[in-house]
Image (spheres, rainbow, N blue to C red):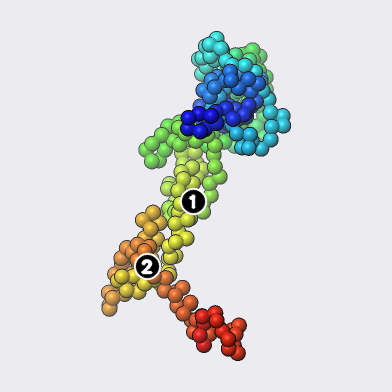
Amino acid sequence: MTTAGVLEKPSNIVGVRFQKLGKLYHFKVREPAEIDPGDHVILETKRGRQLGQVIAYIDPEQVHTTKGMKYVNRKATPRDLVLKQVWETKELDALITCRERAAQLGIKDAKFVKAEYSFDGTWLTISYTTENKKLNIHQLQNTLSQHLNTRIEMRLVGPRDIAKIMGGFGACGAPRCCSTFLTDFSPISIRMAKEQGISLSPQEITGMCGRLRCCLIYEYEQYVEAKKTLPKVGKRVGTPYGVGKVKDVRVLREAVIVEVVEGEQVERYEVFRHELEPLEELEALQKKAEQGCTKHEEGGCDCGAKG
């Protein structure tokens, strides 16, 4: 236990990340005392030996299953880290070579965006995108493998992954979320934009990747919860300015725009939630009370309703 009462290294399971903004993968550690969060380690994966960074120790209750979970091989040495840097310097040349060989083979409907070596150079992953589902790149893969003398994996990625790799700035003027802090892409729907009152024009809701913007999900739940306490558009409500009809909902301000008829003029006011009276609901309750009790028609009623 630490002084704060937080359990250090609660298990022999660690979360490892292979890229700065990549997903977290779970591995077992044989000697937890020898490895700390932040350390680089060597692991066996489907893509051969890889170098990853331990992010944190994971509570076993947060892991669905440990069946088939692999162990960390060892802690990375300074030589391993230098070796990784050396191979990283060769990735751009590998990408250029890939594009040149693709052009020679007449592959025009694919875009190759990233080349990534394993830390020891035994594996090279080429990320590409294409809309041609029937595209065959096995010949390119074999050609590159012979030319670069390493094992090649061609990885098809989507538009959001491309935006994450390319980086740059979003429509808001800030660096793209996907290339700065997002580690996973959440499902985004058009309903999220509707709930927040955002214009549905493509320019307003589409990101640089051509898909719905990731930021549409950030405040979605807050909008949904806040709307439960506010009247919908078209509802009749009581306000300090008189009875009116809701014309717009301002969720983050916890207020609505109400249109009130004053003689021959129509005025609009911003009314906050605590100032509103739900007239339709109150009228419905009053009508129900006036109907009397239907369960004790012969007397002896103690439910509070009066005929």
Residue 41 on image: x %, y %:
58, 19
Residue 134 vs 138, above or below: the answer is: below
Residue at the far bottom in the pictured view: 298
Horizontally, is 133 left or right of 92 in the view?
right
Front residue of 303 and 12? 303
Badge 2 amino acid: Leu
Characterize the local packing of mark 2: few (<14), some (14-19) or many (20 or more) Cα atoms within 10 angstroms: some
Q: Residue 99 appears in which quarter of the rendering? A: top right
- Between 187 and 29, the one lying in front of the other is 29
Alpha carbon distance from label 1 to label 2: 23 Å
Q: Which residue is mark 1?
A: 221
What residue is drawn where x is 44% and y is 61%?
Answer: 229
Mark before the other along the chain sequence, 1 or 2: 1
- Residue sticking out furthest to the right: 67
Q: Amino acid at mark 1?
A: Glu
Residue 176 spot, x, y in % from top left: 44, 35
Q: Is residue 254 visible?
A: yes
Q: Quadrant of residue 87?
A: top right
Residue 48: x %, y % from top left: 66, 20
Q: Nearer the viewer, residue 283 or 107?
A: 283
Label 1: few (<14), some (14–19) or many (≥20) C-alpha neighbours in 10 Å? few
SS under mark 1:
helix
The residue identified by callout 2 is: 276
Residue 98 x, y percent position in the rendering: 58, 20
Q: Is residue 104 visible?
A: no
Q: Is residue 103 shown above or below 190? A: above
Residue lying at 68% horizontally and 25% vertically, measured from the top left: 70
The number of callouts visible is: 2
The answer to which image quadrant residue 301 occupies is bottom right
